[in-house]
């Protein structure tokens, strides 16, 4: 079982503390099992799936240039990659493979935290997360989560609040 000494968790905790988010760092939890999906995390925490901030890393393609893009979306719906591409003025948004995710975040899929990466990653934060007084996000490892708010996610990541969900998710 990982501990808060795990390198990715420790780096993320340092990022929280540097941002002055001591309460969030103190609320970090190591769960018994990996929670690689929003549904699994919600079940483990006993909260609505929409209160999970899913950390999705994409490849933003701008001509020949490919850059990482982090989309923190509510677990209640899926991100619309066409809409996301328009929001970041990319030619397209592609799924990132595990090697790309680890290269740009230092973390494994299913445990990607909003911060603590080798370099700052452009981030969109789903406006739907603001409908919850508290949300939970991964903390650097698939067994780690921490409590936060929509506003803290925007501040911590230097991200942009955005509507990122697919329209058909409303039906």
Image (spheres, rainbow, N blue to C red):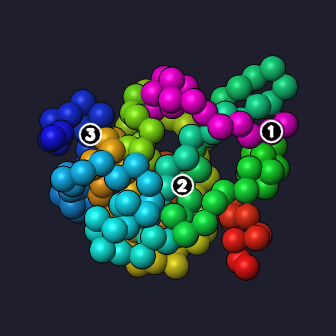
Disc 1 secondary structure class: strand
Residue highlighted by disc 1 = 92
Magenta segment range? 91-105
Disc 3 secondary structure class: helix
Q: CA distance from mark 2 to mark 1?
A: 18 Å
Determine the residue positioned at 45% across, 60% down. Answer: 38
Label 2 close to label 1 by CB (< 8 Å): no
Residue highlighted by disc 2 = 72
Q: Residues within 10 Å of mark 3 (few under 14, many from 20)?
A: many
Of callouts 3 and 2, the N-terminal one: 3
- Relative to 21, residue 70 above or below: above
Give percent across and percent down for residue 49: 45, 70
Residue 138 part of the magenta-drawn span = no
Give percent across and percent down for residue 55: 49, 49
Quarter of the C terminus within the rendering: bottom right
Give percent across and percent down for residue 46: 30, 74
Residue highlighted by disc 3 = 9
């Amino acid at each position: 079982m990982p501990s808060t000494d795990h390198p990715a968790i420790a780096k993320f905790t340092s990022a929280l503390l540097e941002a002055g988010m001591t309460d969030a760092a103190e609320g970090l939890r190591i769960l018994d099992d990996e929670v690689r999906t929003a549904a699994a995390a919600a079940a483990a925490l006993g909260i609505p799936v929409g209160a999970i901030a899913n950390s999705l890393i994409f490849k933003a393609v701008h001509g020949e240039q490919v850059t990482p893009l982090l989309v923190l979306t509510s677990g209640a719906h899926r991100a619309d990659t066409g809409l996301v591409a328009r929001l970041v003025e990319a030619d397209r948004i592609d799924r990132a493979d595990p090697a790309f995710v680890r290269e740009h975040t230092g973390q494994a899929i299913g445990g990607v935290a909003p911060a603590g990466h080798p370099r700052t990653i452009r981030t969109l934060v789903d406006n739907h997360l603001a409908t919850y007084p508290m949300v939970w996000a991964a903390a650097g490892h698939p067994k780690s989560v921490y409590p936060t708010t929509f506003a803290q996610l925007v501040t911590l990541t230097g991200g942009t609040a955005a509507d990122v969900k697919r329209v058909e998710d409303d039906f």
